[in-house]
Image (cartoon, rainbow, N blue to C red):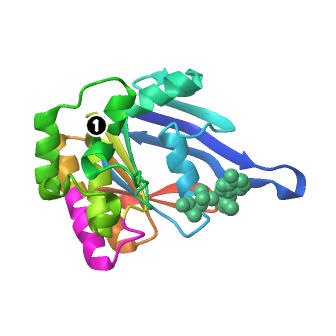
């Protein structure tokens, strides 16, 4: 799937409260790309990722997935499109506390009234090293394990692209590195495009294509 963002902007507030969180960002994401976007706190990283993944709508610009303008979809259509084609990983994991790891992972499929692919679920769990944690509740897991569950959930619908918003931001540096290595390996093995947002230069350096964002302005850093 080819993703093309053209002049995406997001302006919050009005008058003296007006904030240009994202200023005409353009970006093309091709199948299998591994892209990092680095920027300081408040630079517009989350805003950009939410727009690229259809979690939010821009105040200007266009976003096409294989030539289809996804902001022309209704909210309901856009939610379904996101669940089926886009994986999203949050800094805070966002697992539902009353559901087991397995139930969290399959939840996006159930919302689409689809049966999860059991063999694929087992393969994901094995690749992520959580096969013996599937019956545990989130609070019974370490941060790194919770994020690996969240990665499995992001992949369960076999999306074309994964967006990760500071996926290691809540982890110590060792489990953060492990999670990033896993994410990179799983992305490569499964042929997914991966877009990771970070303020950590070591994580940004793992990507093949690196961009930076400062005060809402996105620019290419160079090929690594
Ligand atoms: P980052 O993820 O890089 O820390 P964000 O994308 O969250 O940055 O925020 C970019 C800018 O937009 C910041 O100045 C932030 O305060 C502002 N902002 C983000 N969300 C909102 C909102 N819902 N309302 C008003 N301002 C916002
Ligand atoms: Mg953020």
Classify 10 Å Cα crowding around label 1: few (below 14), some (14-19), many (20 and above). Answer: some
Vertical placement of residue 13 versus 118, above or below: below
Q: Is 68 left, or right, of 151 in this rendering?
A: right
Vertical placement of residue 24 versus 46, above or below: above
- The quarter of the picture where the N terminus appears is top left
Name the residue furthest right: 15
Q: Main secondary structure of the magenta part?
A: helix
Residue found 17% across the figure and 57% down from its top = 130
Q: Which x, y percent locates residue 213?
A: 54, 60
Residue found 28% across the figure and 33% down from its top = 157
Q: Is 174 left, or right, of 73 in this rendering?
A: left
Magenta stretch, residue numbers = 168-182
Name the residue furthest front: 98
Between 132 and 207, the one nearer to me in the picture: 132
Vertical placement of residue 210 versus 157, above or below: below
- Quadrant location, ligand no. 2: bottom right
Q: Which x, y percent locates residue 81?
A: 43, 27
């Amino acid at each position: 799937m080819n993703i093309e963002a053209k002049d995406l902007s997001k302006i919050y507030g009005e008058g003296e409260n007006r904030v240009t969180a994202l200023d005409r960002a353009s970006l093309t994401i091709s199948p299998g790309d591994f892209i990092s976007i680095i920027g300081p706190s408040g630079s517009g990283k989350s805003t950009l990722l939410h727009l690229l993944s259809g979690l939010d709508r821009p105040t200007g610009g266009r976003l096409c997935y294989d030539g289809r303008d996804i902001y022309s979809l209704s909210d309901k259509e856009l939610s379904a499109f996101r669940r089926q084609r886009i994986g999203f990983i949050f800094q805070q994991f966002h697992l539902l506390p009353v559901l087991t790891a397995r139930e969290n992972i399959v939840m996006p499929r159930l919302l689409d009234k689809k049966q999860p692919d059991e063999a694929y679920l087992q393969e994901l769990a094995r690749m992520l090293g959580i096969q013996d944690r599937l019956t545990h509740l989130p609070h019974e897991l370490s941060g790194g394990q919770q994020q690996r569950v969240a990665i499995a959930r992001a992949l369960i619908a076999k999306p074309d692209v994964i967006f990760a918003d500071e996926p290691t931001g809540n982890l110590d540096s060792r489990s953060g590195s492990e999670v990033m290595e896993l994410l990179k390996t799983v992305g490569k093995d499964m042929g997914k495009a991966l877009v990771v947002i970070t303020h950590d230069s070591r994580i940004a350096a793992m990507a093949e294509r690196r961009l930076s964002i400062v005060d809402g302005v996105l620019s290419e850093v160079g090929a690594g």
